[in-house]
Amino acid sequence: MPAESRKKTPKRPLRQAKQPRSKATVNAIVEAAARILADDGWQGVNTNAIARRAGVSVGSVYEYFPDKQAILAVIIDRHLAEGEDMLADAANGLAGGMAIDDIVSALVFGFIRLHEDDPRLHRALASEAPISAAQRKRIAALRSKIVTLVADVLSEHVDEAELKATLLVDTADALAHRWIVDEVGLPASADIMIAQASKMLKGYLSG
Amino acid sequence: MPAESRKKTPKRPLRQAKQPRSKATVNAIVEAAARILADDGWQGVNTNAIARRAGVSVGSVYEYFPDKQAILAVIIDRHLAEGEDMLADAANGLAGGMAIDDIVSALVFGFIRLHEDDPRLHRALASEAPISAAQRKRIAALRSKIVTLVADVLSEHVDEAELKATLLVDTADALAHRWIVDEVGLPASADIMIAQASKMLKGYLSG
Amino acid sequence: MPAESRKKTPKRPLRQAKQPRSKATVNAIVEAAARILADDGWQGVNTNAIARRAGVSVGSVYEYFPDKQAILAVIIDRHLAEGEDMLADAANGLAGGMAIDDIVSALVFGFIRLHEDDPRLHRALASEAPISAAQRKRIAALRSKIVTLVADVLSEHVDEAELKATLLVDTADALAHRWIVDEVGLPASADIMIAQASKMLKGYLSG
Amino acid sequence: MPAESRKKTPKRPLRQAKQPRSKATVNAIVEAAARILADDGWQGVNTNAIARRAGVSVGSVYEYFPDKQAILAVIIDRHLAEGEDMLADAANGLAGGMAIDDIVSALVFGFIRLHEDDPRLHRALASEAPISAAQRKRIAALRSKIVTLVADVLSEHVDEAELKATLLVDTADALAHRWIVDEVGLPASADIMIAQASKMLKGYLSG
DNA sequence: GATGAATGAGCTTTCATTCAT
DNA sequence: CATGAATGAAAGCTCATTCAT
């Protein structure tokens, strides 16, 4: 999962981080940036702070990243990769001839798990960080893959599977985001809310 | 709906914009900032650009706003005010003994209308602009009011009205945001998607 | 005591403040500036603050003063005028064939009185305000006049009267400034210190 | 004698200038600021001008100083340090059982030497630069140390040594300042004036 | 390969001064 | 005459990026 390739011709050839040590450095930088992003928001992210927190020099940051955006790109990439991993897992789980209820549950809990991992970073990423068009595209692609996968398993049960899968995925994702990442007040525990949401989705698909 | 009052004691007293000329200036500044925000994102918003686009001098910007954030605050305030207005309208519409289907439709179309007005600004506001804790609170309060209102009318038909109203509102809002503001690809026209979402919500409440 | 004439050709002809109302306005402006200078130091003095404090508009300030420096110039002028008045008084007092002790006493107490009037303004004027070369010259001229006057009366008693008068005047002025305007800690009351200083000066002249 | 520690929590951590290169940079900045202060007064001191004159970039200025005031603080610190050094020297010179005349001469010439070093900077520092309360305190402390030292050696000869030392020190300092730093016209050469002042002080202490 | 001092474009903010009303 | 909104040059300050060591 390389950082989205930058267009501008790189003055300084970037190191490729093949060596273990290099990998550790790259990792430290990305982790540091993610941590600052989660703690202080995008406004707190600056290359000197990243370098300091990562325990390396600014110079080293620029050995591995063409610019600041590229670090954010890798953070997003990793996030998306997690999403893709989860998707792969889910794909295995879903594959067989599953009941609608189980499909919905799998999906809903999948999104919840995804959002429960580091919600502060998740929020900063979703609501502060400047995301490039290319990254947006990648996010859309991931979403699209999920929809396709869900549509596939749904198609055994319903017609207009893609349309319904889209509604299913978008609802599950959006509600998980709102209830876990945004810290909105809820009239009942998140678990109860989620149960209701599941019920709603199941009803929709079964109806 | 005044701009959220700034805490820091203002050394330079801010002008109050009571006169028509002043009001026009303030308006031009806020509009310009909103336009830049919609066009170039928060990163493109800087006081010189705002002044240039508003056709005023930087000095005038600082006559009326203590700093850049305060301009954003007013933009958000205006947005929330629109939401509140719409809420008031909706409240009138909902008031009577309405059928569930009509309640859902009113709500769904309400959120759609809300998001269809300047979606690019809406996106920038939702996903880039640094929103203060106080503003977040105001947003939460607005959402809470809407939930309460919906819960009220729902309570004639269902039990656990608040819980269900929350699910209803959050789903309608989130999907409207995703399908209108985010420019995600959809397998069917937005109208069809919306119809499906309405169906899902109605089924949930009626079931 | 007019404001020291500015060199630059005035775009806008300055009003001359002959009318009583105009005089009152000029006065209010100068007083306001002096008050701010005493309260907040030179850094706190800005034309808008002056206008506000004087209860007039900035525009009016520029009716009577070509620029900000000119206001300071008038403040200094008035200060110097007070000094000159005191000098005239003293001249009358000194005129006759006075004893050395009385000359010294008159001088020392003259300087004390001068510094005791609004010491905070005095300090701001002496240690923060940017004084032009012309103003420095005027200050030097006043000092010179005082020296001459003192030398005159001293010449009845001593030779090298001018030299001694210079020492006398500069010492009395400097010590008064230090002990009254600067808020330095003293090992005895100012009165006792002053008595000692007088004794020193008298001894010097009589020796 | 470090620059008076700034209170505000530094968001941008300041570099410490331990390396020779850094030290040279810091030095160049302080020297440049002092030079501009002497040449153009405090009003001419701005960070861009300092950087230009120091042959460094503005950025470097802010690497080492949190703000403009901090540079002034260091200039004052250095000045005070010089004063303290001179005091230490003088302390050695005075220590023994010295005659009154020699004490006075040492003191008078000490202050003269102090003021003869860069009188223009001295004047700008004394009469334009905004000095913080803390710096004022440090100045007062230095003066107090000098007074104590002088009182000590005087106490062998006179009673009320502290009071007399105060008069001695303040007079010597004030006259040196006036005759050397202020460019006042004198009726005789500075040397002659100084001789007279010394005579006056000696007479006072011996009387 | 690292390092971190240095750079400087770019932004924010102030305030003396002007000028339309 | 007076007003005060508007102006914009000039400073202050930040931080992504470069480069000498």
Image (cartoon, coloured by chain):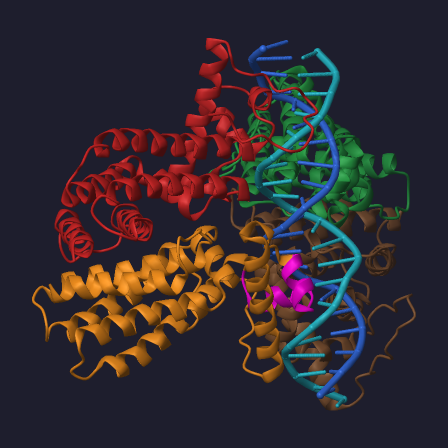
Chain colours: A brown, B green, C red, D orange, E cyan, F blue
Residue furthest left in the image: D159
Can residue B103 be spotted in the picture?
no
Q: Is residue D72 magenta?
A: no
* Front position in the image: C135 or D127: C135
Q: Quadrant of residue B135?
A: top right
Q: Is residue A154 left or right of residue D107?
A: right
Up-down: is B114 above or below E13? above
Which residue is at 24% across, 44% downward?
C154
Which residue is at 65% across, 74% downward?
A51
Q: Is residue B70 left or right of residue A72?
A: left
Can residue C4 be spotted in the picture?
yes
Give percent across and percent down for residue C119. Answer: 31, 40
Which residue is at 70% across, 54% downward?
A126
Up-down: is B91 above or below D67? above
State the count of labels: 0
Residues rendered magenta in the picture: D48-66
